[in-house]
Amino acid sequence: MGVQLGDIVAKKEISLDELNGREVAIDAFNALYQFLSIIRQPDGTPLLDSKNRITSHLSGLFYRTVKLVEYGVKPAYVFDGEPPEFKGKTLEERKKAKQEAAEKLKQAQERGDLEAIRKYAQATSVLTDEMIKDSKALLEAMGIPVVQAPSEGEAQAAFMCAEKKVWAAGSQDYDSLLFGSPRLLRNLTITGKRKLPNKKVFVVVKPELISLEDVLKQLGISREELVEIGLMIGTDFNEGVKGIGPKKALELVKKGVKAEQVYEEHGLDPEGLNQVREFFLRPKVTKEYELKWSKPDKDKVIELLVEEHDFSRERIEQGLVRLEEGFERTSTQQRIDKWF
């Protein structure tokens, strides 16, 4: 879920064309869960191969990455490592929520409620070790850099952006800002026409650019105070205080109030908050990574997608042509304003 800062953070809509020549570190788990949730059949069932293995994530990863490269974007995917110990409660709650969704899915299937089936099917998405392994293998065969983070992928992507190794971090969550990424790109992997949850309404989703410097200037706070807001409203690592939203938290932070005070005033135990605070300000990251975009290995891509997972050979070959042409165009271009 990530920290919910949408109500107080200014976002700028941009087009994929404006990202031509930009390197972007994408939170891989964030993107893969989106693909698992969105890419489904009309009854909510994910895409499956002949052995009944889910392939929604591979479909999204291949075609979305091809599209990004066609627009001149140079994506690198950053995979999560070991989560911090204090994330255990969040992971347990997510597991419980998936179990509840699975039960509701069963009930919806029994009564033939297609809308409910689709809704609860999306909520049961699970990313397995095999899916992660296949995703990395596909990206490497496509010539796309894969970065293994020691801990949170978003923290590593933010670090890479702060080091100017990439232009922006790509994720749906605002945590990248708390981790100190100078720029955050949202909607990068879900641009296009999308159906609103629980509604028969479609909207056009466009990429959004958020500048950390602009956000801090607009709100009149420091990054440390932005982290404080996150602690008050809740992050992936702490629950937050019920009834405290981002606007109220901003008001409190500007008065010099710390998260521990808010917790105590609401009868909550503030133990562990400083540990989470330190994790956002000084996360576990690595400098040991390589960003190298190369010509795709067509045979390996076809072996994985077509021969192993039953994708259409014709469509994959067409995608590979687009991917290769995109790389060729990007390699001959260089932005003058690369880091601005």
Image (cartoon, rainbow, N blue to C red):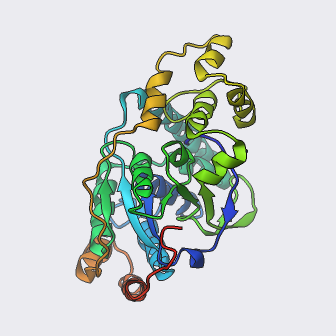
- Relative height, residue 323 to residue 118 (above, below): below
Q: Out of 28 and 316, give the one closest to the viewer.
A: 28
Report the number of discs. Answer: 0
The quadrant of the picture occupied by the N terminus is top right
- Relative height, residue 259 to residue 7 (above, below): above
Residue depicted at x 53% and y 44%? 175
From the viewer's perspective, is 110 left or right of 126? right
Is residue 223 among the parts visible in the rendering?
yes
User: At which x and y percent is residue 232?
Assistant: 62, 28
User: At which x and y percent is residue 301?
Assistant: 29, 76
Q: Out of 217 and 170, give the one closest to the viewer.
A: 217
Residue depicted at x 64% and y 46%? 216
From the viewer's perspective, is 130 left or right of 59? left
Residue depicted at x 47% and y 52%? 30
Is residue 27 among the parts visible in the rendering?
no
User: At which x and y percent is residue 59?
Assistant: 43, 69
Residue depicted at x 65% and y 18%? 262
- Relative height, residue 7 to residue 228 (above, below): below
